[in-house]
Image (cartoon, grey):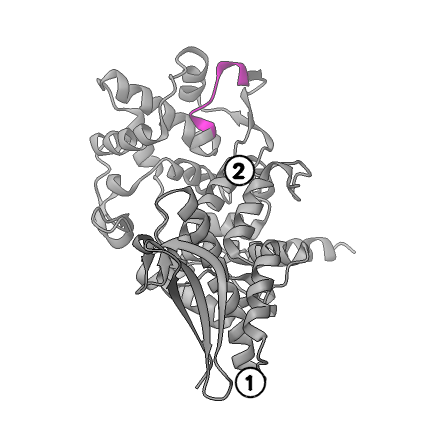
Amino acid sequence: MDRQLLYMLTPISATHGNLWVRLLSDIDDPQKVDTGIQVAFAFWDPIRLSIHAEDLENSDASKRFEKLKACLKTSLAKRNQNGGFIGPNWLAKHVSLCFQDAKKTSESELLFQVQNYIDSAKLRRIKRTGSLGLSSSSVRNLHRFYTLIQSFEAHVGNIIMVENIDHKLVKEFTHWLLSIKGYSTNHAGLQIKLLKMICKEAERMGVEVHPYTRHIESFTQKSSERYLQTLSPDEIQKIKKLKGLPPTLENSRKWILIGLVIGQRVSDLLHLKAEQIREAEHGLYIDIIQQKTEKHVTVGVVDPDVIRILTTELPYQVSQQLFNVQLKEICRLAGITNPVKAYKTCEKTRRKVLGVHPKYRVLSSHDLRRYFATNYFGKIETPVLMQITVHAKESTFLSYIGQHVNKDAYADAFMKVAATL
């Protein structure tokens, strides 16, 4: 059989004991080493092999013990896999190494690397802009990823070390995300992407990682499984013609009409101020520095109704959560109730489930931005639209609106020029 590690508490007083570790094997002599960790009997769990961290002293002992277990388990797993001989001082040597090289042990922990990435967020250079500092949404995703890894470690019962992230572990993590946590394909794919990013950064900083981490591949939902929602021109007219709404709903109705013609994220839409608006020859300019990308974009507005709202009736700010609730109510009052196939969050599981719902129930603030891109696609050159929506790649933009690259258009453009040569 493989060598096994056993942990036990040996009394040193009526209330406390020293933690010892034993290495058992059929072929090698058993070894026993005092770890130097003292703990009260009342806080030792012999079933889970853990220390209850009730105060600062126990918390420190618990952290040292968990690190020791992870370190010894990793070292022993490698030796078992290789089938090498274990000398009589192997256990004592590795216990010593675990405590003497605690920093190295910590750096090998996935959670340590995630926290390190978060801590250095303000100093990280963004390739696409050349600026420093991750966006607030990126930092928020990293914090959520940290919590997620904590949950996964509890699920597998081990501290995850970057040097142990192999094909088997990534496959188990993916199954856990999709089947046990019930996350959507896109959300699970984002977590895999973050995992690879953290491992790549750890390797860049000189930490030993498993070679497989370079081959981790993220994933997204199939285009055939996507159900995108947008508003039709007729439905827009219904919203425009709504009269007699309560003041709060009328305020959000104005935000909806603005959102439909500027093509920006709701975080930028709802923070729009009068000083961002300028007169133009054929309408208005709106100057925006996007919160997510930190890119500057100038949007042109020609819709007479929206120009009037922007110049004389600029709505007051509301929260994104309230705006989404009121958007649905406004669409319901406008009669946008036809049944559509869409994903909707289940109140019980808090996960999105595919079903048929009245359209107003599945619309959200983000659909205003998608309407802008969809409505003008094919009427205005795609690069112009991409400058306004700030999509870096045409493939990303087309995927966003559920379209495909028009290969004929490229061929036609080539033939038009080639025929004149």
Q: Which residue is mark 1?
A: 83
Magenta region, residue range:
268-277
Q: Determine which quarter of the picture holds residue 210.
A: bottom right
The amino acid beneath tag 1 is: Gly
Mark 2 element type: helix
Quarter of the picture holding the N terminus:
bottom left
The relative height of residue 29 versus residue 273 in the rendered view (above or below) is below
The mark found on residue 255 in the picture is: none
Quarter of the picture holding the C terminus:
bottom right
> Which residue is situated farthest in the top direction here?
312
Q: Is residue 138 left or right of residue 188?
A: right
Percent of width and height locating residue 38:
43, 55
Q: Determine which quarter of the picture holds residue 182.
A: bottom left
Mark 1 element type: loop
- Residue at mark 2 to residue at mark 1: CA–CA distance: 58 Å
Please report whichever mark, 2 or 1, sits nearer to the chain's N-terminal start: 1
Q: Which residue is mark 2?
A: 389
Q: Nearer the viewer, residue 420 or 65?
A: 65
The amino acid beneath tag 2 is: Thr
